[in-house]
Amino acid sequence: MRAAPTFGSRADAHKRYDERYFERWYRGARTRVHSPDDVERKVHLAVAAAEFMLGREIVSVLDVGAGEGAWQPILRRLRPEARYLGVEPSEYAVRKFGARRGIIRGSIDALGEAGVRGRYDLVVCADVLNYVGSAGLRRGILQIATHLRGVAYLELYTSEDELTGDLQAIDLKPPAYYRRLLRAAGLIRCGMHCYASESIASRVTAMEGGW
């Protein structure tokens, strides 16, 4: 598995999420961690999971740590009527893609301060969580749960996983650590990086939702 962060935090505050960073890890053919096809498949997976659990098409998406907003054009093609909001701390990414792709500047543990309001059918947090310090991670997952009414796609890797890519400032903890955080936030595991909100808990079967 390959990893690359798009979210600034205390743990990686010395890193610069500028154009060169995104060019290397997200666009460079030889160095990128995900191909365009990989991203496309992730989006299809997350949308399908949310719509299956909700029993309808999604109408809203919150992308936390959106980076340059790579998910937004794909979501626009799949669900053109769905409202999309991206939150990203990189000044470069917001300056270049904010107006075009609906991205505002903010951090995972201060979504309200960034202007995020209400709840969303799908909340995305990809290439982010393993680069956030412990305190910020706890606050961030709680805030994600607060803004979720459907399914969250949360990429989380553990100390038992083997990763390549940008490993600078990555913080991998045992699986039990993340399970505790997610349970405390009321998120219910339903497979493939997807977690259901408590409001649709009745739709998660025992085999899907076991910890």
Image (spheres, grey):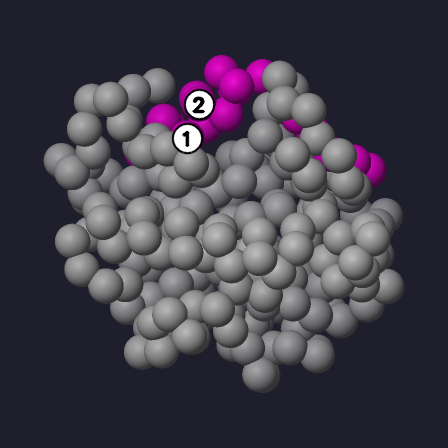
- Using the image, determine if residue 113 lies above or below residue 7: below
The reply to whether callout 1 and callout 2 are in contact (CB within 8 Å) is: yes
Distance Cα–Cα, label 1 vs label 2: 5 Å
In which quadrant of the rendered image does the N terminus lie? top right
In this view, the residue in front, 14 or 25, is 25
Query: In the image, what residue occupies the spot 79% across and 48% down?
Result: 13
Is residue 182 part of the magenta span, yes or no? yes
The residue under label 2 is 179
In this view, the residue in front, 159 or 144, is 159
The residue under label 1 is 182
Residue 171 got which mark? none
Query: In the image, what residue occupies the spot 36% across and 27% down?
Result: 183
Label 2 neighbour load within 10 Å: few <14, some 14-19, many 20+: some
Is residue 102 part of the magenta span, yes or no? no
Query: In the image, what residue occupies the spot 58% across and 83% down?
Result: 99
Q: Quadrant of residue 104?
A: bottom right
Q: Position of residue 40 (x, y in %)?
A: 51, 59
Quick one: SS at disc 2?
Answer: helix
Quick one: SS at disc 1?
Answer: helix
In this view, the residue in front, 90 or 47, is 47
Point out the stretch of residues depicted in magenta: 167-187
